[in-house]
Structure formats: C-alpha cells, structure tokens
Amino acid sequence: MITAIRRLFGSRLGKALALAFVVIIGVGFALADVTGNSSFGGLGGANVARVGKENIGIGELRERVRNAYNQARQEQPTLTMEAFVESGGVDQVLKQLVDGLAFEKFAEQLGFGVSKRQIDGRIADIPVFAGVSGKFDQTRFEAFLRERNMSEAQVRNEIKQQLLLEQLGIPIGSLPAISPGVAQPYAALLLEERKGQAVYIPSAPYAPANDPGDAVLKTFLSENKAKFTVPERRVLQYALFDRSAVPVPTVTDAEIAAAYKSNAAQYAASETRRFAQVIAPDQATANGIAAKARGGATLSAAAQSSGLAASTTGEQTLAAFTGATSDTIAKAAFAAKRGEIVGPLQTGLGWIVVRVEDVIAKPARTLADATPEIREELAKNKANEAIVDYYNQVQDAVNSGASIEEIAADRKLKLAETPAILPSGRAPNEPGFALPPELAPMVGQAFQVAGEGESQLATLVENEKFAVYAVKSVVAAAPPPFAQIRSALLGEWRLSQGQKVARDKARAIVKSTSGGQSLADAVRAAGPNLGSVQTIGGLRGNMGRDGKPVPPELALLFSMAKGSVKTLELPGNRGWMVLSLTEVNRPDPKQIEADRVKAMAQPLSQAFGNELVEQLVNEAKRRVGVKINKDLVAQLTKELTGASPVGE
C-alpha cells in the first residue's frame, strides 16, 4: 500500500517534477481561497506555508490532499484516508505545492516566462477537456472547473508552473552522462552474492484460545481502527444513452441530389495512372536510360546499368502528379499510352525519364449509381451530428443544475441505482452485486466529485456511449458495527497476542546467537513450534526482476552487515523471522564486462539527472524563501485522520 502511495507522487524526472499541475489534471482537485493575514511566525493564521511573498492556505492544502487521496484509491480501492495520511500523503502534497510555487518565482527571477498562447495550446491538448468529437470543448472545460470549484486563472497558473519547469528542469535533468569509471562499482554491486540463514517463528501456535470479552476487543478495535475500516462508499444514480437512443433524421432524395451536385467532380469520369521513374544527373545519362528502356529493358534495369535506381508511384491523378513533378512532365506523362517512355525532361533535380506502368480509367457515375454511397455517408454524418447534439443538450441540462431524475424523465432514459459501492465497483454489503465493467469510467469519475446530488456526464465509449449520473449519498469510511465484526476481531486479537510471544522468542534467539551460539542451537533452545533453519540468499541484481516484489527477508539480508543477526516482523501478525548473514561475495569492479558497465551507466545518468533537478528546486526554495507552519500541518493531519474536529 505504501509503495502504491509513493508511486502516486513519482514522475519521469523524479519527485522534483511532481508539480501540482500533474495532480490537478490527473486527479482533478479543487483549489480553495488563500485566507488570513495575521502574523504567526511570519505566516498568516490560516496559512500552512509562505513561499516568497505568497501564501498557501490550509483550505487549499486540505482539498488537494483529499483529491490526491481519491486518485490513490483508483489504484488501491481499500485505501483509507488514515492510511494515506500516515504514509506521508499530506507532506507530499504540501511539498508539491511549495516546490511548484517556489520554482515559478525562481524561474521568473531568472527571466523565464510563459506566453498565453503556450498555455492555450497546453489546455487544448489535455484529454479531459476534449468533447465528443475528440477536440477541445469549451463546455467540457467549464464543466470541469465547476465540478472542482476552480477558476480558469487557477488552471492557467498551474500550467504556467509546469511549462516553466519544462524549460529549466528537463534540460538539466537530461544533461548528465555517467562515465564507465563511475558506473563500474554499481555494476559490480548488482553481481554481489549473499548467503545467510533464516528461521520463521509463526504467531498462530502461541495465540491464546480464550475470549477476552467485549471490553478488551473494543479497545483492540480502537487501537487498530484502520485495519477494520471499510473505505468510503458511494451510492450512484445513473442513466445510460448511446446512439441507439438518439433519433436520426432520414436522408432525403433532395439531400442526396444536393450532395451529388456539390461533389460533381468526384463522380465525373476520371483517369489515374501509375508510373516508374528515374532522375539522372545529366542529359546524356538520361538519354542512355531512355534508349535502353525503349529498346525493351525495364526502366529499373536500364537505371541500374547507369548506377541509378528507379522508383514507382501509386495511383496518381493529373493534379497530384503535377504537384510532385511539374506541369510539363505531368501533361506529357498523361498524354502517353500504357508502356510508353516519356522524356528525358529537365527538372530542378536533373533529367527525368518516366514509363507509364498502368492507366486506370473510371467512367462517370450517375446520380443513381452514386446514391447508395451518398446515402450511407449522409446517414453516418447525421448520426454523428445527432449524438453530438443530444450529448450537448444533456450537458446543457447538467450545467443548468437539472437533477438526474429530471434529465432521465425528460429524455425517457431508464434510471438505475447502485448500492453503496467502492471505487472498484464492489459493494461490501452485497457480495453478489456486480457492476458492468463498461461503467468503470463513470465510477472512477464519481469518486472524484465531492458534492452529492449534482448531475454529471461520463463518457463510457468514445463517441458511442455515455452516462449521466449523480452521487446520491456518501457513506463515510468507518468500521462496521462491533457485533458484525466481533468474530474477526477475536481472531485478530488472538493472533496479535501470539505475535508478541513470537517476537519475544525471536529476540531471545538473537541474544543467544550474539553470545556465540549457532542459529540452529538457539532455535532448538527457544522451544517447540518454531520452523527449521533455512538457507537463503542470491544475487542482488536478481531482486525485483520482471517487476516481481522483493521478499522482505531478502531485502533485509542485503542491507545487513556480514556476521550480524536481525529480526523481521511479518505483516498481518503472521509471526517473526530471524536472519543471519553468513557470506558476502563482491566481484572486483575492474573485472566487470564493458557491456554490463554500459548498461548500468544509463539508469545512473537518469538518477543523477533527478538529483540535479531536486537540487535545482531546493535552490529555488532557498532563494525565494519558504516557511512552513508545522503546527497547522499537524492540525490538518489530525483532522483528516479523525483525531481532531474539523476546523479551519
């Protein structure tokens, strides 16, 4: 879970590039007003940070954290706000805010700037602002701002920060090139081999069998609230519509006739040709090629005899071939018969020789001949226009504040309702409920919308299928009723007690081995129910290969000193492990193959680039000046985790 949260704040140039704009577009957070001017260690009373002469308000930070949490839940549906905050969510979001604002001010001091046209272009390229046609839609853009309580100026400022960072950060982050000498020790590190011993001490055999009573279990629940908390759920009302629900006007004969007339050239008799051609540097060479081709050789063979190569074209109209050559050459080529040689004729590149490979004549098409094709094309265009018009009408109704019930009734759409669901679409209280996979975009969007009862639009299949929906109610994250989870609590309490016994035995084994006893003897002396001593180890470079997670015992083994003994707690109260590192084999860096060193230099260069960008941002903060109100940040942390009442 923590890994997923950390990954949320990553970027291709490292954490320094994880600016607020990346979050604003990917997550869709809302900005709040920056308020308060009273002094508090140089900060306004409601401001969590001051960057230069500008403040970051607690309301702004609160909203950004909530929306970053919503984004994290897309990857971790069971994630709770408490776990998100405890994993550093508040600090990371605040860092993004501070870094972005400090970098903006620093770049401006250096004379860098961003034009309105650049910002307009970036906005137009953002997919979330695209309408049904796939192009930028002002209505969709305005709806986005309303949904997230944002102003256009706020979005533009975030884009400005991103563009400034690209101007300065990306060139710096892309500069470093690591020499082989620097990469050698790191390449050798990947070939380091370690061996050790491990013993598993399970908690289950030491778990008590008694029932401690409700009071103890309720205390245990309060101490482990996050573990039993069901994440926030939402009840959605929705109605679907697609092309089949949209009436499409019939194509009339008059419309077909008008289309035929306006595209008369398309249906008139036409001729296209395919050519082989070669361009010679001088007239003498071109004459020789033409003579051989007229004598029966292929143009390709004739060109090869002079050290040149002929090329062939696809079907060409007179206009197209004129554009590719010249008016004189094209007219001559279209006047010749199939198989005839044209030229040599002079061009700007030399002397061209052309052979007419094929002549494709298309007779004129009457209105009756073209009608089926025209009718199909007009019907398709009308269907596209109809769905766009219908979508825009629904969007207008949404923008005007119409309820989901009103929209569905006016358009005779079937209104459906989900039970309280998670972002994954699963309903914890109704295990048999299954939401159609096609509704996933709607569900993901619904969990980013803060208000209840507000109608929204979601695209399910681009240009084909859509949903109008509203969040009917929000069920806050909380543990289920005590009676409902008592048996699960009892099982967890027993394992937690067994975990304490396993911990004590693990510590006793470490103490014994530190006194000179072998690991096997120390395990036998610790009593029954312990696992046998196992040999573990491997190459450092094999850890995490193919994206597989690194076992925690191996991760610890590769961070230990040779001859040391460590304990490792297993998650879920499953027990403890004791690890002993017995052997470390490191190859000589100078003996590493050149290919291995070269392969290591590239990721090292990227890491070095990340470090340079991070230092650049730190220097920006130093020059601009940053102050953090740690007390207010701590207050917000408690508020978000439910440890203190909500307040500004």
Image (cartoon, rainbow, N blue to C red):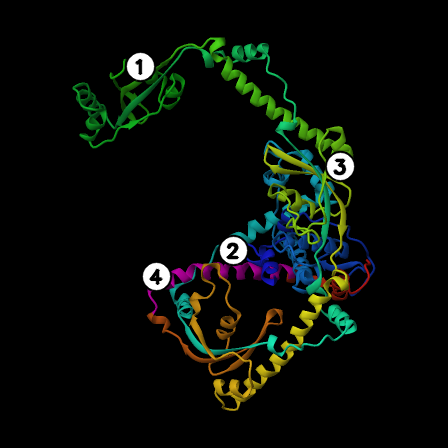
Q: Which comes sooner in the sequence, label 4 or label 1? A: 1
N-term-proximal mark, 3 vs 1: 1
Measuring from the top left, give residue 30's x and y in whole percent.
72, 48
Quarter of the image that includes the N terminus: bottom right
The residue carrying mark 1 is: 332
* Quadrant the C terminus occupies: bottom right
Q: Are marks 1 and 2 in contact (CB under 8 Å)?
A: no
Q: Amino acid at mark 2?
A: Ile
Neighbour class for label 4 at 10 Å: few (<14), some, many (≥20)? few
Amino acid on which disc 1 is placed: Ala
The residue to which callout 3 is attached is 404
Choose top left, top right, bottom left or bottom right for residue 3: bottom right
Residue underneath mark 2 = 172
Image: 562 above or below 126:
below
Q: Nearer the viewer, residue 589 or 414?
A: 414
Q: Is 304 or 501 nearer to us in this picture?
A: 501
Residue at screen point 40% across, 63% down: 179
Query: Measured from the top left, where is residue 261 in percent x and y?
Result: 53, 10
Disc 3, SS: helix
User: The residue under label 3 is which amino acid type?
Assistant: Ile
Q: Is 507 one of the magenta-colored residues?
A: no
The span picked out in magenta is 592-621
Disc 2 residue crowd, few under 14, some 14–19, many 20+, Cα 10 Å: some
- Looking at the picture, which amino acid does disc 4 mark? Asp
Q: Residues within 10 Å of mark 1 (few under 14, many from 20)?
A: few
The relative height of residue 153 versus residue 605 in the rendered view (above or below) is above
Q: Earlier in the sequence, mark 2 or mark 4?
A: 2
Figure check: 362 above or below 74: above
Res. 184 in view: yes
Relative to residue 214, is residue 127 drawn left or right? left
Question: Gap between marks 2 and 4, in whole Å?
Answer: 26 Å
Residue position marked by numbered label 4 in the rendering: 595
